[in-house]
Amino acid sequence: MSSPTPDPKRWLVLLAVMLAFLPVVLDMTILHVAVPRLTQALNASGTEVLWIIDIYPLLMAGLLVPMGTLSDRVGNRRILLTGLMIFAAASVWAAFAQSAGALIAARVFLALGGSMIMPCVLGLIRKTFEDPGERAIALGLWGTVGSAGAAVGPLVGGAMLEHFWWGSVFLINVPVMLVVAPACWFLLPRVEATTPGQWRIGQALLLILGMIAVVYAVKAGFGGKQPWSVAGLVLVFGIATLTLFARQQLRSAEPMLDLSLLSHPAILAGLLMAMVAAGALAGVELTLAQELQYVLGKTPLQAGLFMVPIMAAAAIGGPVAGFLSNRFGLRLVASLSLLIAAASLQMLAQSDFHAPGLAVPLALAVLGLTLSIGLTASSIAIMGAVEASKGGAAGSLEATGYELGTGLGITFFGVFMSGVFSRAMELPASIPATLAAEASRTIGDAYIVAGRLGGAEGAALIEAGKAAFTQTHAVLLSTSAGIITALALVVFLALAGHRPQVAGSPH
């Protein structure tokens, strides 16, 4: 069968959907630098702040697959435009929220809008670019937005907070949406290839409930926010719910999610790459942001500027991945990029950030470039393994991996960091026993306790905390390097027989 004539507007379509995706990824990281300001402005408790941050990735993780399969049923254009409107309205709501509860509710609707946008973007790219070579380039450009957008979030947030109130970090979404929504309305095709069948709301709710329960249990249990007895019960409930969902899908003549997608080694490899690369990028950013602010005394904006090499390199990683994959093959590019990322992490683990020289910026740039290539390679593997009509479902699977990787990456990095910090902390002998345990939890807690103590005791505690965190930072990055090295081997083996789908190829 001959390939259809390429859409002459396909590159304009790509530009529109990339702009639609940008605010979604910015919102994953931009809020972190605003937390101190909004905590004071809204008089939010620690639990409320936790939910303000976590509700977005938590709901996104549960909503992405149902929204991806819904877009395959009714068309990506309709779902994308609806998601853009919801996201814009929720951004205004969040920017002017007058209480923690209102901000949490606004973040729920941001997650709903974002979960409608993300899988549609990948689905539209899959449907618009049938040629595997062009598709790799298009996914590479999309990867630029995904990697650089998440990386630049703290810098944009820090810059906004230099001049405006905390709500401005949400309000910047609105002008983007006002430009993107009309562009998508005019550019996206009115007629699309869709998957027949009904979208069963009961199955969707079952999946959402199961995903949220599992993710919450892992985050709450490992994060120490709930006793393991409670987290364990929630985890069992979530697994049971997801098992019931999977059995329904396997028995149904018209399943909401085609679980046969998971039989593709390329899709499984792509999901692993998406989760680990996204988790590593988010976790490393979290670690570096704390090292730069707590140990080196930089402001949020200065910390963001220090990490510019990661952002700049991540911005070009997507197109580089597309070009290299076409030239040398996806298997070699994906596995080699992960190995180089591991090497750069090990180099950063052994570097002195007080005297960075050229070595640290270079290692940061290599890390941003290679993790961005890894994220884009995951998209090329997943979207190249399915036919166009299943692009939304495959895209939502990858986006779920990206969200889970980001959320759980921050959780596991934070928990691991706390454990290593506690063991590395050498408390001054004069610290009262009642405060010693609190000061040993995290470097943030050490600063809080030091503020209460004041004087020479407080200063000594801060110096001890800085020394402990520098050790923690080195152990954390070395461990990450080992995990990514193992992933590189898994990806090399899993992509041994990868061949991208083209128009007219068998399913």
Image (tube, rainbow, N blue to C red):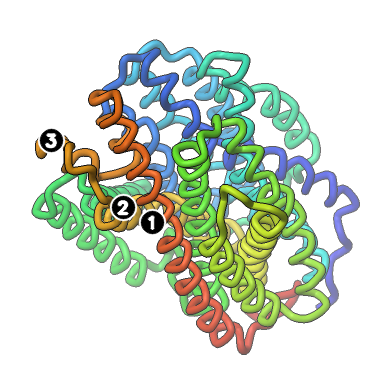
Ranked by sequence position, the earlier of labels 2 and 1 is 2
Reading the image, the residue beneath label 1 is 472
Reading the image, the residue beneath label 2 is 421
Residue 377 locus on image (x, y percent): 65, 68
The residue shown at (50%, 51%) is: 282
- 10 Å neighbourhood of mark 2: few (<14), some, or many (≥20)? many
Query: Is residue 206 visible in this depiction of the protein?
Result: no
Residue kind at label 3, given as amino acid type: Pro
- Report the Cα–Cα distance between label 2 and label 3: 19 Å
The residue shown at (77%, 55%) is: 316
Left or right for 93, reference 206: right
Reading the image, the residue beneath label 3 is 432
Q: Nearer the viewer, mark 2 or mark 3?
A: 3
Relative to 139, residue 456 above or below: above
Ranked by sequence position, the earlier of labels 3 and 1 is 3
Residue 494 locus on image (x, y percent): 54, 84
**What SS does tag 2 mark?**
helix
- Residue 474 placement: quadrant: bottom left
Residue kind at label 2, given as amino acid type: Phe
- Residue 186 placement: quadrant: top right
- Between 270 and 348, the residue placed more toward the observer is 348
Residue kind at label 1, given as amino acid type: Thr
- Report the Cα–Cα distance between label 3 and label 1: 24 Å
Picture quarter with the C terminus: bottom right
Residues marked 2 and 1 touching at CB (< 8 Å): yes
Residue 268 locus on image (x, y percent): 50, 74
**What SS does tag 3 mark?**
loop
- Residue 107 placement: quadrant: top left
Query: Is residue 29 visible in this depiction of the protein?
Result: yes
**What SS does tag 1 mark?**
helix
Ranked by sequence position, the earlier of labels 2 and 3 is 2
